[in-house]
Image (tube, helix red, strand yellow):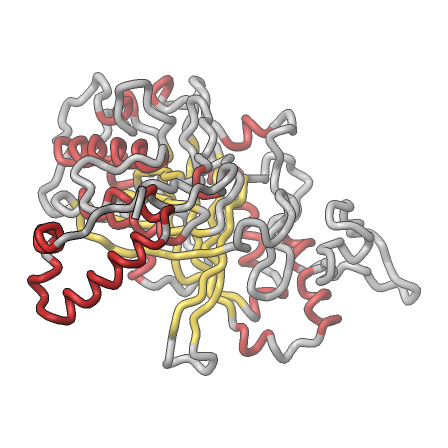
Amino acid sequence: MAGGPRWDRRRVLRTGAAAFGGAGVGWSASAAVAASADPRAADGPTQVIGPSAGSETAPATGQHQPGITTPPQAHLALVGWDLSPGAGREELTRMMRLLSDDAARLAEGRPALADTEAELADHPARLSVTFGFGPRVLRELVPRDARPALDELPAFSRDQLEQRWSQTDVVAQICCDDPLTLAHARRMLLKDARPFTHLRWVQHGFRNARGTVPEGSTMRNLMGQIDGTVNPSEAEPDFGSLVWTDESHPAGASFAGGTFLVMRRIRMQLDRWDRVDRLGREAVIGRRLDNGAPLTGAREFDEPDLQATDRFGFPVIDPASHVARARSSDPTQRFLRRVYNYTEPAPERSTGEDSGLVFLAFAADPVRQFVPVQQRLDDLDRLNEWVTTIGSAVYAVPPAPAEGAYLGQALLEGADDAGLP
């Protein structure tokens, strides 16, 4: 047949199909006939017209790491490592050289070095990897002249923290629109980090699949509420000071363009939430369920009027509602939220699932910006009856590396290394 491959006994034997016996030969013969009958088979897969979402890459962000202002992708894998006993700055440096190269290649749709499943890297689907260092790494492995000030978050009375979701030495926030690409990137990073670390946890999260809702829509959490309406926008004049550090930071130029990441794993009591009617749910939050508008407004981004009262003189928005307690007259008490839902099997629970939020927040100063807000919610918030924080951590997120450098190099190779490993 003109244009198709010629299949004779010698060629079949060369393919190794005959090694599987009669059944193998029969399958190969059928495949050969199909290949000969369809001229497209000789030319490879049918050509797809136009670019696919899988070919998209996360846009470059200059001196900042990707995955912070990047529009949130559909899937999250948050990986927390502890350095192995005896590992010091030299081991951390070697690891970050490897992981930085892995992340850069995979985000471009190229396989990592020694990638044994190279084809799984072909579709980056806006993959981004964001790295951060925990307080112990900063105290013990970063020279004093380059060290950002970072302490663990204070204790909050309502937290019920579990050790398995606690602070780690290093974190990688891996985000992607395709779960297969995400799984491959996670596996590559885990393999290359294995000689230097102990894996503490992997937290998976999800938002709406790409294309399900209009671009730029505020996500909904598993309680049905629109979650993240008050996020600051890059168009706002104070966005930079809320999110990024500059050379006035104590760490100076080595951390300029960096930020800090707060992680809170928040478990939802959805079985109990199911018993609350619609009006009760809206009163607890202070917003409407249908479009996220405050109870005193009509649209999602309307400003809540905390002084408004109904015809009986009662506040329209309960002063103990989540909206009222989270807000502040201090404009510095704001931060960039990047929130993902999670659901994991939990046969021991009545619902059969453990569900909630992987709450991620980026701030130039978490003590000044995040802690006061969380303290108010800890003191009083009607939502506390249905949510519990079970994991908490904070990380310094270095700026993006210069061309040819690795992530964190400006911190780990500071000038003043006296007394450090």
Horizontal and vertical percent position of residue 258: 41, 28
Identify the image quadrant of the C terminus: top left
| Residue 92 seen by the camera | yes
User: Does 95 appear above or below 349?
Assistant: above
User: Does 374 appear above or below 91?
Assistant: below
Query: In the image, is 385 to the left or to the right of 115?
Result: right
The answer to which image quadrant residue 408 occupies is: top left
Query: In the image, is 281 to the left or to the right of 148?
Result: right
Q: Which residue sits at x=20%, y=61%?
A: 28
Horizontal and vertical percent position of residue 326: 62, 51
Horizontal and vertical percent position of residue 104: 32, 32
In this view, the residue farthest toward the front is 1
In this view, the residue farthest toward the right is 311
Q: Which residue sits at x=42%, y=22%?
A: 63
Foreground residue among 216 and 237: 216
The answer to which image quadrant residue 113 occupies is: top left
Foreground residue among 207 and 114: 114
